[in-house]
Image: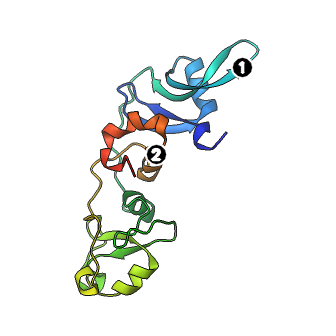
Amino acid sequence: MSQMSEQVLVLNRNYEPLTVCGWQRAVSMVYVGKAIVVEEDSRILRSPSMEMKMPTVVKLAYQVDRPLPKLKLSRQNLLARDRHTCQYCGRRGKNLTIDHVIPATRGGTSSWENLVACCDRCNNKKGNRTPREAGLRLIRRPRRPKFIPYLSFATFAAAVKNPEWRYYLEPFAPHLVGS
């Protein structure tokens, strides 16, 4: 089993994504009546007393009211927002830096609207200049993500790539689908 297939998306009673858990936890929630299987795959789980298909998405049998989490400005969340793609040249990868569009030494803030993922080559080319001064253009204007998931933003951005979960996640962040 791949790691993502061992994971189960947990939805609130209103189908809002709450968390991702291991399949064992999901099966135990279904067994005790705390959750209902919404999606399953073809694999069969067997015990001496029962048999069931492996759940991939479960919905809680009751509504969990939680305060909206704060979206933390972090390297992990910035890279997830920018889809691990340099916002100047489009190069994808894990070895990206975070760049101040308006350099901090020139009054640029460390904010969602002024930080972007950047490859080393573009970061060196840009240096302590604005993109225009360096002859670079942003692929996408940096913005604070609109949707704040109960899942961490980075987990949500990764989860939306799972085709079995996409239907349940897309309404909450359509801009992340198709990445």
Q: Position of residue 2 (x, y in %)?
A: 64, 43
Q: Nearer the viewer, residue 3 or 89?
A: 89
**Quick one: which residue is furthest to the right in this view?**
48
Q: Position of residue 84 (x, y in %)?
A: 44, 62
**Tag count in the figure?**
2
According to the picture, the residue beneath numbered tag 1 turns out to be 46
Q: Nearer the viewer, residue 179 or 22?
A: 179
Q: Position of residue 18 (x, y in %)?
A: 43, 36
According to the picture, the residue beneath numbered tag 2 turns out to be 161
Q: Quick check: can you spot residue 163?
A: yes
Q: Nearer the viewer, mark 1 or mark 2?
A: 2
Quadrant that contains the N terminus: top right
Residue under the point 42% across and 38% down: 166
Disc 2 residue type (three-letter): Lys
**Element marked by disc 2:** loop
Q: Quick check: can you spot residue 67?
A: no
**Element marked by disc 1:** strand
Q: Is residue 43 above or below residue 86?
A: above
Report crowding for label 2: few under 14, some 14 to 19, many 20 or more residues within 10 A (C-alpha).
some
Disc 1 residue type (three-letter): Arg
Relative side of 20 to 114, left or right:
right
Among the 4 quarters of the image, the one containing residue 31: top right
Q: Which tag, 1 or 2, sits closer to the chain's start?
A: 1
> What distance separates the C-alpha of mark 1 from that of mark 2?
29 Å
Q: Which mark is residue 23?
A: none
- Colour scheme in use: rainbow
**CB of mark 1 within 8 Å of CB of mark 2?**
no
